[in-house]
Amino acid sequence: MIPGSVTAGLLAVLGVIHLYWAARGIKGRSVALPEKDGRPVMQPSRASTVAVAAGLFGGALTLLARLGLARLPVPPSWPRWGAWSLAALFGLRAIGEFRYVGLFKRVKGTPFARWDSRLFTPLCIVIAVGVALAAATGPAVRPGR
């Protein structure tokens, strides 16, 4: 239960960081996007950044529900499948898209690539493993008991 709880907290912190960026915060933003020729390869909108934050918060809540620490008005199997989906999503992010992001990226000389290799991808691996552990083990306690 502890790895899952820590992972849920980590997802929530990442959600807060994305809300900060959506509010036009600049700290850390310069290394948060892959680059080509010194320019970001994408320009996420405020709405898409908020959507990522919402997904991270939703992932944290799903994980807490899977652990039996939160109740959701959904069938009991949904948090389990949601947790497995979240583990797969972060596992795929860690693998990457083979050009700018992940373990197998080809573009390596940019500030983003350095941060991706040292922090972002390892963090995705840790999150994927933490979520998978929670998905596999299930609730330690039953909500409402």
Image (cartoon, rainbow, N blue to C red):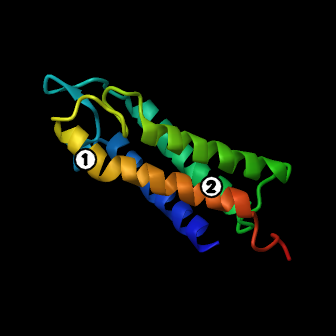
Where residue 121 appears, as percent x and y from the top left, is 37, 47
Q: Which mark is residue 132?
A: 2
**Badges 2 and 1: C-beta atoms under 8 Å apart?**
no
Where residue 125 appears, as percent x and y from the top left, is 46, 51
Q: Which mark is residue 50?
A: none
Q: Which residue is mark 1?
A: 115
* Residue at the image point whose x is 29% and y is 46% from the top: 117
From the viewer's perspective, is residue 111 above or below residue 7? above
Camera-side residue of 25 and 77: 77
Amino acid type at circle 2 is Ala
From the viewer's perspective, is residue 41 above or below residue 70? above
Where residue 21 appears, as percent x and y from the top left, is 33, 44
* Residue at the image point whose x is 27% and y is 29% from the top: 106
* Residue most extreme to the bottom: 145
Q: Earlier in the sequence, mark 2 or mark 1?
A: 1
For the residues marked 2 and 1, what is the alpha-carbon distance in whole angstroms?
24 Å
Q: Is residue 62 visible?
A: yes
Q: Is residue 3 left or right of residue 29?
A: right
* Residue at the image point whose x is 71% and y is 68% from the top: 69
Q: Is residue 120 left or right of residue 124?
A: left
Dot 1 surroundings within 10 Å: few (below 14), some, or many (20 or more)? some
